[in-house]
Each structure stands twice: as structure tokens, then as C-alpha cells.
Image (cartoon, helix red, strand yellow):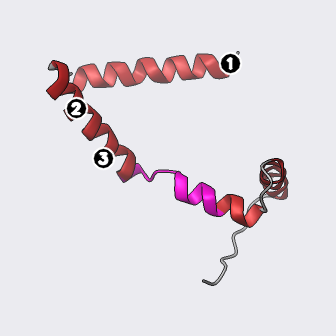
Amino acid sequence: MPDANIRIPEEAKDRLAAIAAAEGMSLRAYLARLAETLLTPAERAERAERARAALRAWNGYAPTAAEQQDLDGELDRRLAQARGR
């Protein structure tokens, strides 16, 4: 399979290379593994829907769209708070 060239800031490349090296991997292998493990937005949405369906079947949990939006907002707030620590 042919390689692809991407342009990223030198600092980002250096950081990724250091992370890869710390895991005993080349930058190329690390990026390939990263691409294999990250989910696309569509894949995340599909998993979320499967989780909602499992919760509905298990305990009847079925939040409304407004409740989901409130919960998403609360999660975003907590994540922002955790990043600030």
C-alpha cells in the first residue's frame, strides 16, 4: 500500500513521534494504529444509538431529546472543568 503525505506543524509531528517512540513504535506505525482505533462521527453515533437501545431494553431508560441535550451540556461542563484542573 502506498504511503500518504500529510502536512502538520513540526511541533505536532515531534510530539507524535515522541509518543510513538515511548510506546516502542515508529511514527508511521503509531499513526496507522491511531487511525484504526479512532471512531468516525458516524461510528460514534451508531454506538451511542446501540447503547441507548440497550438501556431502553434493560431498564426502560429513554430520555427525551431535551434531556439528552441537558445531559450533553452537563458532560461538556464537567469535561471543561476537569481540563482546567
Number of the front mark, 3 or 1:
3
For label 1, the residue is: 84
- Comparing 84 with 28, the one in front is 28
The mark that comes first in sequence, 2 or 1, is: 2
Horizontally, residue 80 falls left or right of residue 20, namely left
Q: Amino acid at mark 1?
A: Gly
Expressed as whole percent of the image width and height from the top left, the position of residue 60 reads 14, 20
Q: Nearer the viewer, residue 64 or 2?
A: 2
Q: What is the CA distance from the residue labelled 3 to the residue labelled 1?
A: 30 Å
Categorize mark 1 by other alpha carbons within 10 Å: few (<14), some (14-19), many (20+).
few
On residue 44, the disc is none
Q: Is residue 47 left or right of residue 65?
A: right
Residue 46 has which mark?
3
Q: Does the stretch in magenta take in 67?
A: no
Amino acid type assigned to the residue bearing label 2 in the image? Ala
Instruction: Give residue 54's mark.
Output: 2
